[in-house]
Amino acid sequence: MNTLCLGKLEYADPLYEILSSGDGASLKKKLSKLASFLYIFHKKTEKEENIELDSVNVYFQKILNKLCQQEIISPSDKKEYLKLADI
């Protein structure tokens, strides 16, 4: 399997594998259909008013607290997820 190296991190790139194996046209067609569906779905379900993010952040923190209490995630993972919420 091909890997992509970014600094010290290496990871397998399944899309590269598919594209280099000759199945790229089929993949592109399927991804295009998916993108079209998601665009149409988004347009039908989007709302004109903004979402109150404070309530979303509070809910996210509650979920993280629960996962940490249940030892599903570690306290250091919880901190990383909270950093993502701030982005």
Image: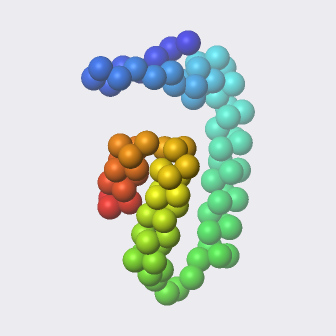
Residue situated in front as seen by the camera: 9 or 19: 9
Instruction: Please tell me which residue is depicted at 52% across the width and 85% down the height of the picture.
Output: 48
- Rendered residue at 67%/67% (across/down): 40
In the displayed orientation, state which residue is furthest to the top: 1
Q: In the image, 35: left or right of 53? A: right
When the figure is inspected, residue 82 is found, relative to residue 58, above or below; the finding is above
Judge whether residue 34 can be spotted in this image: yes
Please say whether residue 60 is visible from this viewpoint.
Answer: no
**Quadrant where the C terminus is found in the figure:** bottom left
Quadrant of residue 86 in the image?
bottom left
Question: Which residue occupies 50% across, 52% down?
Answer: 69
Q: Is residue 26 above or below residue 20?
A: below
**Which colouring convention does the figure follow?**
rainbow
Q: Nearer the viewer, residue 28 or 53?
A: 53
Which corner quadrant of the image does residue 7 belong to? top left
Say above or below: 40 vs 82: below
Question: Between residues 36 and 45, which one lies in front from this camera angle?
Answer: 45
Give the residue furthest to the left: 7
Side of 9 where 28 appears, left or right: right
| Residue in the image at 35% along x and 43% along y | 76
How far from the left and from the top, in percent, is residue 37?
Answer: 70, 59
Residue 21 horizontal/vertical position (percent)? 64, 17
Q: Position of residue 59 (x, y in %)?
A: 49, 70
Report the residue that reaches farthest toward the front: 69
Measured along the vertical axis of the image, is residue 63 above or below residue 17? below
Q: Quadrant of the N terminus?
A: top right
Q: What is the total number of numbered labels drawn onto the structure image?
A: 0
Q: Is residue 62 left or right of residue 19?
A: left
